[in-house]
Amino acid sequence: MSLDALLRLVTAVDVRWDEELTRAVVRLADDRFVPLLVRLCTGPRPVALVALDGLATLHPGSGAVRALAAVFTGSVGDRRVHRAASRALVAAGPAAVAALLPYVPWTVAADRRLRQSLAWFLGRADCGTRRAVGMLTEFLSDPCSRTRGEAAASLGLRGDPAAGPVLQRALAHPDEGVRARAATALGRVGAHDATVQLRQSAAHDPFPTVRDAAAAAVRALAARGR
């Protein structure tokens, strides 16, 4: 049976979708099945997880964003579904950013777990590095330390040296997780001005995770040169 015929069959017949059948469609890796997977991602949890993972590999485009954003914002209590929706939204491209902007940096609707996921998303989203750095910088002032840590890590992933000064300030954060992630990010963005501060953290921070991250950042900066 051709893929076109299979597509007509599964969309015309009232198929009872289960996890295995959804997996079979995902394995085809054909973007013509994106609308079907978008519909399935709002269904029962096992099927939704498979559909979301499939969409994350298919670059679903703007047509999928509304449904994916609804799953993303409505699934903060289910970590696996929420993470799968996050990955699918990254794959959906710039339209996903526009759909999630109302929740950035934090609003009444954006609870703590949602803010953490948004900080993760902005490290990977197709929205332009400078724009993402601006939003992530706001997240570094979030009331939740975990969100600040996620923002620091995402700034490192963006790789923009402009994030260096705010990441240096994050090295003094009272939470060791934020400090460790800020140290790693400073190495990734090439913040040579932070070398002295990183060496101090590597020598004197009371937490070994921070000391190790700072020492690794110093080595990364030395390897990059100037």
Image (cartoon, rainbow, N blue to C red):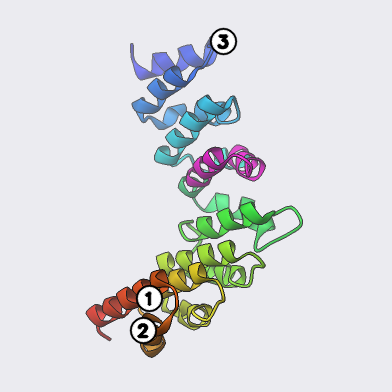
Judged from the image, the secondary structure of the residue bearing numbered disc 2 is helix
Which three-letter amino acid code belongs to the residue tagged 2?
Ala
Q: Earlier in the sequence, mark 3 or mark 1?
A: 3
The residue mark sitting in front, 3 or 2, is 2
The residue mark sitting in front, 3 or 1, is 1
Which three-letter amino acid code belongs to the residue tagged 3?
Asp
Q: Residue 211 carries which label?
A: 1
In the rendered structure, does residue 72 fall within the stretch colored magenta? yes
In this rendering, position of residue 152 left or right of residue 204: right
- For the residue carrying disc 2, how many other residues have a C-alpha within 10 Å: few (<14), some (14-19), or many (20+)? some
Which three-letter amino acid code belongs to the residue tagged 1?
Arg
Q: Which mark is residue 203?
A: 2
Q: Earlier in the sequence, mark 3 or mark 2?
A: 3
Residue 210 falls in image quadrant:
bottom left
Q: In this view, does 98 lie above or below 179?
A: above
Mark 3 to mark 1: distance in Å?
A: 58 Å
Are circles 1 and 2 on residues that touch, CB within 8 Å? yes
In the rendered structure, does residue 91 fall within the stretch colored magenta? no
| Magenta stretch, residue numbers | 67-88
* Disc 3: which residue: 14
Dominant SS of magenta comes to helix
Task: Report the quarter where the N terminus lies.
Answer: top left
Mark 3 to mark 2: distance in Å?
A: 65 Å
**Depth check: 164 or 77 in front?**
77
